Amino acid sequence: MSTLDIVLFFVAVISVIGFGTWKGIAKSKNEPKGASSYFLAGRGLTWWLVGFSLIAANISTEQFVGMSGQAADWLGLAIASYEWLAAVTLVVVAFLFLPKLLRAGIYTVPEFLEHRYGVLSRTIMAIVTMVILVGVPTASVIFAGSKVITVFFQGTTILGLDIGNITVSCWIIGISAAVYVFVGGLRACAWTDLIWGSALIAGGALVLVLALSAIGQKDPAELIATKVATSDVTVAQLADAGPIERLTLLNSGAAMPGENGAGGKFHMVRPASDPAVPWTALLIGLWIPNFFYWGLNQYIMQRTLGSKSLAEGQKGIMFAAFLKLLIPFVVIIPGILAFNLYSGDLREQADIKNKQVLVEFQSGKSEKVFPFTENFAKRDTATALALASHNAAKAGAPLEVGAAPTATEIFAANTNLVAAANKKGVSSATKIVGYDYDAAYGTLLKNLLKPGYTWFVLAALFGAVVSSLAAMLNSASTIFTMDIFHKLAPRANEKVLVNVGKACTLIFVGIACVIAPGLGSPKYNGIFTFIQEFQGFISPGVLGVFLFGFLVHKAPRYLGWLGIVINAALYGALKIFTPEIAFLNRMAICFGVVIAVLAICTLVNPLKEPVKMPVNTAIALETSPGVKKVGIGIVLLTIVLYIIFW
């Protein structure tokens, strides 16, 4: 980066954080200071603040690193289901979830469970949500942001700190977000989200344009090496094709099971054997994390709970739903382009990632077995064969390959040997990979951005990180303060509650910054998968419990805690004993079991009288007539996109 870009980057970041802090402090004249002001922005957010805040809280380097990395790998456009189905999910949330939550006048999502099911249900959800929120998505967002930012600051030292170091970068990101959350609460988050969200979409569009330009200029003889196996494109065809046609030709053909390169990448429907997004997940599994995330996740719903009215909240959600339809074009398509353009760079990043594991193997003293990907075997067949021979000895089984084995044969044999060794109690080392797909977006930026506008794209990405992080810190502190501390100290005044929330912000960011640097290990199978998979311990159970709370008025009160506990236990058991089941399918199984248990309990032991819920009279609870038409339009647009990219 040029000196000018570095200066402009820090000026932009400091200015926006300063603006957000100022807006957080500058409350309206008639608004009383207290918990509602700090945690819910005085319940005065307008639709455009709600909409941009939802997107900025959601779209972070979890997407730019994780989703673009998954797109660079075998999934391609299929990972966009998280975005496009989210648009439909948001429509449902606006008309089913939001009216019930706003009418109850709650501060937190777990608080609804107390009114409907009892204190125990609220407490269990609050504790589990808070622990997972701080330890998984919060730490992951910090790590993913550091992974992108450090690419540009290698060798840059400021005040004695190496900005290019992952650990240092994690702490800078964490502190940046904590500053304005600590001072201004949700209002500060919402106003900075407005700026970061706008810059993020503009910056992502710029990167997409630059990447398409680059693939249009790249030597076809180099591009042909990155085509998928199902593509029959030739160098001559690439030479005559434009940028978009080159991209589609290189990644055309049917979606096939297997590692990156096995099949086409422009399909939303993947084979049932796909380990990440099988077509079966589109029926049930993928809807579970979507409904949990957008309808029951505190750090998302806190924005809508702060709406000045139901109509404003619904308009904001519709605005966010429309933006979700655009996100794949600025996040996922660049990921596919990154592999076609810079697969060599991703191999180099993988070498860095693999170094420590290979040193352990080469020492000759390791008692572990060494799994590796097929792409690694294709890159370095000799080392793959040596690893497989070592694993055969540890498994006490022969290495069943031919005299001149192919990479595919070695990989298949090694997979069986590792499984056999694991059954005997031999532990596995971290998987050795052929490409570091999580580095896809950072690599794209490093190669495409030029002095003069690098600062803007990086500032937008940095803003995406701190926006999501700020949302998570604000929500985690709200949950602890209102769901746990306030129950233990019911007489605590408004000032004490705000101070406890501020203290939690500092504690939680410290914990997350300690965890974050360790998330770069290949054992997590990519940062996006890591986040989504661990959410499975809570999302199916919570969704089932809330649906019964919303729709089944005679569901007994003990179902609240029962559904959450059953899901956590079952999901954990499935993860341990049937790891071959795709995690989205595990979620579907858990959801089905939870719903069945809740239904049986309700039939056997229904409430004599429905629970009387509180009614919030502080805001208008009428639905905007035009919002329903917008919602129908968004659902139809989503269907059209699935038809085009089936």
Image: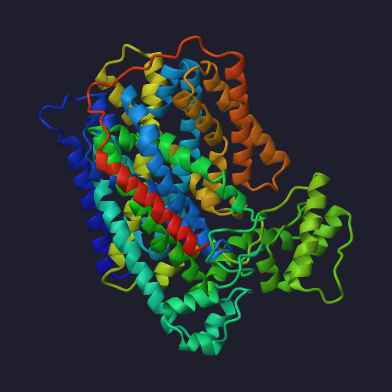
Residues 288 and 340: in front is 288
- Say if residue 50 shows up in the picture: no
In the image, farthest residue toward the left: 29
| Colouring method of the image | rainbow
| Residue 584, x across and y down, in percent | 59, 45
The spot of residue 619 in percent (x, y) is 22, 27
Residue at 36% of width from left, 47% of height from top? 632
- Look at the image and tell me in which quarter the N terminus lies: bottom left
Residue at the spot x=58%, y=76% of the render? 227
Residue 626 falls in which quadrant of the image? top left
Task: Using the rendered view, name the quadrant where residue 24 is placed.
Answer: top left
Residue 246's place in the image compared with 84, above or below, is: below
158 over 565 or under it: above or below = below
Residue 155 percent across, percent down from the top left: 40, 65
In this picture, residue 621 sits left or right of residue 89: left
> What residue occupies the far top of the structure in this picture?
608
Total tally of numbered discs in the picture: 0
Q: Residue at x 73, y 40 (%)?
A: 577
Locate residue 69 relative to residue 302 in the image: left or right. right
- List x then y, in percent, for residue 528: 51, 51
Which of 130/353 is in front? Answer: 130
User: Considering only vertical position in the picture, is 628 above or below 65?
Assistant: above
Q: Is residue 458 visible?
A: yes
